[in-house]
Amino acid sequence: MHTTGVGPFAPRAGRWALPLAGASAAVLAACAGYYVARGPSWLGALDSAGTPHLFALAAGLACLLFIIRRPEAGLLLLAAVLYTNLSEVAVRNYGVPSLLQMLAAAVAAGLALRHLSSPEPARAPIVADPLLVPLVAYVAVIFISSLVARDAALSDQRLAENLKGLFVFILVTNLVTTRATLRRVVWALVISGGFLGAVSLLQALTGAYGHEFGGFGRVKLAQIVGGVREPRIAGPLSDPNFYAQILVALVPLALYRVWGERAKGLRLAALLSLASVAGALLLTYSRGGALAAGLVLLLAALDLKVGLRYVLPGAALAVLLLMTAPGQFGGRLETLERLLPEEEDEAAVTVHAESSIEQRKLLMQSAWKMFGEHPWLGVGAGNYSEHFDEYAAHVGSVTPSYENFAERRYPHNLYLETAAETGLAGLFAFALAAVGALASALLAARGFRRAGDARSGALAMSLALALVAYLASSLFLHGHYIHYLWLLVALAAAARRVARDASEGAPASPPRAEHS
């Protein structure tokens, strides 16, 4: 019987199917043997717990095989694991091997099997998106800068982080080939944000700041304003400000799902996720996150042409959120006025010297001075902290640079960090990737809307605003957790390609992938 198929186990899979399946199994077996040989602590739990752990291990292997069979499903899981930081939480709290690496390997294996085992006429080409050029260039600059770095280990760590992001970019742009898949991945992120926000709200409402809720409820006791110190929610990350950054990027994604979904159940789910994310964002006390959220909501209102009947309830909701916000949240926002130049008397200097804003001025000015003296390749990726002390001494800040001596320093500005560590070469490549991603999302929104698909156009616009939120908040944060940015960049690139296929009237992928 003549049968076509596109899966790795299709009847016309060809001579590549069995060898590739065997190679995948061999790689998985080698990885398992490696961890058994190392004797990790999590494996020893099998001796005490027995059957439940064996069932969990068997379920995990079955899940990996399913992902190899259906890589799009694996991509949804990969996006959720990445955004909730589940892999790092599991490694940190339970000593298990990296879930993110295993998922990425399984998804890549599934993609390779599908490509090589499909019959030649139906074989989809491997996508090499144009944004790969600046991304690869940026990674190359990081590698070259490591040659001049004082601490090569720090450069290698930064290189590894960006290589992971590059790998995720390749997977996303090759698997997100339909409007349905793009929408599912966005929903995976929205649901992930709802989960994280719910954990944070539960933690605050119960006052259980001493309990980490399985690693998703980390807390930092920090200065809020003046001499007031209160718990700041950090979620699954190491710092409340970074938690705010990944939350604010979800605000437009959830908002546009509320606006664009037809089913009432989905709109309600998106609304609950939006409320959860907004509540958690307040609990971070992040000034940069608040500013980025305000910017995104303003741009969304302009894009959606929100009428007066929506403005008034929205304003009422904003007032309600501020009224129910933590006690010192408003006072913390008021400290932003210290960014403005003013004449300071001696008392003001003393107050400012104790503020985190003055600390950040010192950190940023030091980064600028590093860039001025090393304009081409910088001081080496990840090496800002290695040079901070010598440059801080020449900046002339009123803030003592010797506070928290021996603590690693960061410039609290992604763009200054990139300039200081990788010079003009790295800054140019990074800017091309960021601007190219934003342009891709906007082109996708316009392409969908021209094709008469307003819902997909709104989805692409929400990705553009998510990028705006992340990049705006990066004015106050350095490049920790950069993989969140590369995931948004990948989705923007994928959206542009899907919109192009839609406008040309060509199917973006085999019909099998369109099933809901």
Image (tube, rainbow, N blue to C red):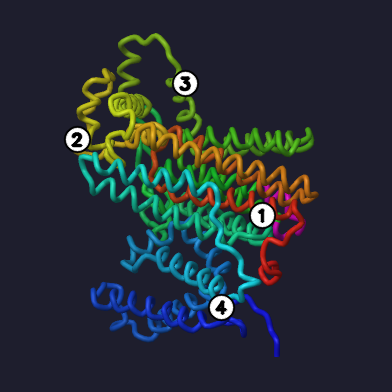
Q: Tell me the kind of residue under disc 2.
A: Phe
Q: Is residue 19 left or right of residue 309?
A: left
In three-dimensional space, the C-alpha distance between marks 3 and 1, rounded to whole angstroms, equals 44 Å
Q: Tell me the kind of residue under disc 3.
A: Glu
Residue 424 is marked as none
Q: Earlier in the sequence, mark 2 or mark 4?
A: 4
Task: Say which quadrant the C terminus sits in.
Answer: bottom right
Q: Which residues are magenta?
A: 256-266
Q: Position of residue 2 (x, y in %)?
A: 70, 86
Q: Earlier in the sequence, mark 3 or mark 4?
A: 4
Residue at x-position 28% and y-position 83%: 47
Mark 1: few/some/many CA within 10 Å (<14, 14-19, 20+): many
- Residue behind mark 2: 405
Residue 337 is marked as 3
Task: Say which quadrant the N terminus sits in.
Answer: bottom right
Give the label, 3 or 4, closer to the camera.
4
Towards the viewer: 384 or 223: 384
Residue at x-position 45% and y-position 17%: 340
In three-dimensional space, the C-alpha distance between marks 3 and 2, rounded to whole angstroms, equals 28 Å
Q: Earlier in the sequence, mark 3 or mark 1?
A: 3
- Residue behind mark 1: 498
Under circle 4, the secondary element is loop
- Determine whether label 4 and label 1 are within 8 Å by CB: no
Under circle 3, the secondary element is helix
In three-dimensional space, the C-alpha distance between marks 2 and 4, rounded to whole angstroms, equals 56 Å
In the displayed structure, 107 sits above or below 247; it is below
Residue at x-position 48% and y-position 67%: 108
